[in-house]
Image (cartoon, rainbow, N blue to C red):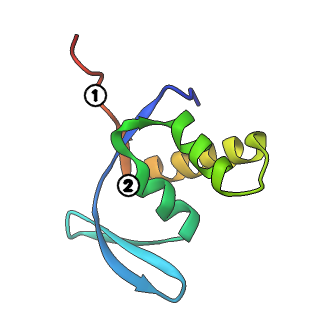
Amino acid sequence: MEESSRYLKQGEELGVEQGGVLIAIAGEKVYAVTPAAYYVWRMCDGSTTVGQIIDDIVSSTKLSREDVKAAVSTIIQQLLSAGLVKPAEEPSS
């Protein structure tokens, strides 16, 4: 996954249940995501890059950048598969 990639979150946060955050998509499906996945999902605002998400997590934890990059890549792939994020449009020049 390219660190320059940007994603836009989809769905709406419904609340917390049994340690997971509930996110609904178009009122049809509801997903319970882990706190780590929720954190990444929230940062997918269409302008924040994957690299910036990784750097933010590294700066607030004692984890290595390599470990964080692997985890963030996996989380974004899972969010993409579930339809909870989509690739952001490239800005017009």
Circle 1 crowding by C-alpha within 10 Å: few under 14, some 14–19, many from 20: few
Which percent across, then down, holds residue 81?
46, 49
Furthest residue to the front? 59
Q: Which numbered disc covers residue 51? A: none
Tell which of 55 and 14 is nearer to you: 55
The answer to whether 32 is drawn above or below residue 81 in the figure is below
Q: Residue at x 47, y 29 (%)?
A: 5
Whole-angstrom CA distance, mark 1 to mark 2, is: 16 Å
Circle 2 crowding by C-alpha within 10 Å: few under 14, some 14–19, many from 20: many
Which percent across, then down, holds residue 68?
70, 47
The N terminus, quarter of image: top right
Which percent across, then down, holds residue 89?
28, 28
Which percent across, then down, holds residue 80?
44, 47
Furthest residue to the bottom? 18
Tell which of 34 and 28 is nearer to you: 34
The C terminus, quarter of image: top left
Q: Nearer the viewer, mark 1 or mark 2?
A: 1
| Residue, disc 2 | 84
Q: How many marks?
A: 2
Q: Residue at x 52, y 37 (%)?
A: 52
What is the secondary structure assignment of the residue under circle 1? loop
The amino acid marked with disc number 1 is Glu
Closer to the chain start, of discs 1 and 2, is 2
The amino acid marked with disc number 2 is Leu
Horizontal arrangement in the rendering, residue 12 relative to residue 64 (left or right): left
The answer to whether 10 is drawn above or below residue 7 in the figure is below
Q: Residue at x 37, y 55 (%)?
A: 84
Horizontal arrangement in the rendering, residue 92 relative to residue 10 (left or right): left
The image quadrant of residue 87 is top left
What is the secondary structure assignment of the residue under circle 2? loop
Horizontal arrangement in the rendering, residue 63 relative to residue 20 (left or right): right
| Residue, disc 1 | 89
